[in-house]
Image (cartoon, helix red, strand yellow):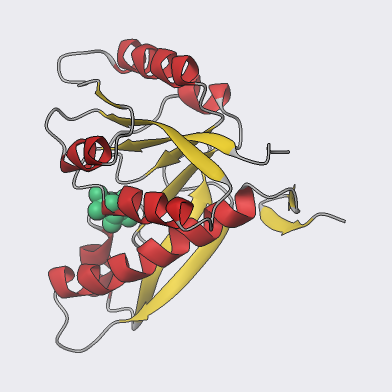
């Protein structure tokens, strides 16, 4: 399924702490991958700065003022030019169109700060608090054409504490995100799994 070292791209829109967690895990030899491109749809995203500090290829393709598909065509061009085989969404605050999803079938990964299918979409930590759940966490999943919806790869849980606000809860969830994303990539980039419906199961 994957080469010994798979070329991956990371798409982000913000500070890029998940990108850094992935890059650190790769540097420690924990994920059989190399990052060939870091791409942001937001000019000046902190994650781009972090990528350049590490000497990685990093580009900004701002979506502002562009139609979704026109923007994605540029993104796709950059991904292909870099030779990316897998795409990791790491705080990429942009809904993907079928164009991109179909270009990388079951090879786009996303992380979401809730236990999906609960609380998809924006402000997942606030949604979880307002619902009154006692446990939340994060989910790494394969991307399909619906928002925060594809097959689940890894979930990690976090207790919701009585005095939590969205900020405090998010701060504990992000710690688990930084463990979950490398763990998920380690599995996905091995040749040891297959999909059984929505379920990721060991390959026989
Ligand atoms: C994370 O909470 C991630 O789950 C969500 O956006 C946030 C990105 O954070 N999709 P960072 O840019 O990786 O620090």
Residue 9 in the figure: left or right of residue 33: left
Which residue shows up at 39% across the image and 17% down it? 78
For the residue pair 35 and 45, the one nearer the viewer reads as 35
Query: Quadrant location of the N terminus?
Result: top right
Residue 145 in the figure: left or right of residue 200: left
Which residue shows up at 31% across the image and 18% down it? 68
Q: Is residue 169 above or below residue 15?
A: below
Residue 145 in the figure: left or right of residue 62: right
Q: Is residue 161 above or below residue 13?
A: below
For the residue pair 114 and 17, the one nearer the viewer reads as 17
Residue 5: % across, % down = 61, 40
| Residue sitting farthest toward the bottom | 162
When asked about the image quadrant of residue 202, the answer is bottom right
Query: Quadrant location of the C terminus?
Result: bottom right
Does residue 115 appear anywhere in the picture?
no
Q: Is residue 128 above or below residue 79?
A: below
- Report the number of numbered marks: 0
Residue 51: % across, % down = 27, 39
For the residue pair 3 and 76, the one nearer the viewer reads as 3
When asked about the image quadrant of residue 176, the answer is bottom left
Does residue 26 appear anywhere in the picture?
yes
Which residue shows up at 66% across the image and 51% down it? 198
Residue 91: % across, % down = 29, 46
Q: Is residue 103 above or below residue 22?
A: above
| Residue sitting farthest toward the right | 204
């Amino acid at each position: 399924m994957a080469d010994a070292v798979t070329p991956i791209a990371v798409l982000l829109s913000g500070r890029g702490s998940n990108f850094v967690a992935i890059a650190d895990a790769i540097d420690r030899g924990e994920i059989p991958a190399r990052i060939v491109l870091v791409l942001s749809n937001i000019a000046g995203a902190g994650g781009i700065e972090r990528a350049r500090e590490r000497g990685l290829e990093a580009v900004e393709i701002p979506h502002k003022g562009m139609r979704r598909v026109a923007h994605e065509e540029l993104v796709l061009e950059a991904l292909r030019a870099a030779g990316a085989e897998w795409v990791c969404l790491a705080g990429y605050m942009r809904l993907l169109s079928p164009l991109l999803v179909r270009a990388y079938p079951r090879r786009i990964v996303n992380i979401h700060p809730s236990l999906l299918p609960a609380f998809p979409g924006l402000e997942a930590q606030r949604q979880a608090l307002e619902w009154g759940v006692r446990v939340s966490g994060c989910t790494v999943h394969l991307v399909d054409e619906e928002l925060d919806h594809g097959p689940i790869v890894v979930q990690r849980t976090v207790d919701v504490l009585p005095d939590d606000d969205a900020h405090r809860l998010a701060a504990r969830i992000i710690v688990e995100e930084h463990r979950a994303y490398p763990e998920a990539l380690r599995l996905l980039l091995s040749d040891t799994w297959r999909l059984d419906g929505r379920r990721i199961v060991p390959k026989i």
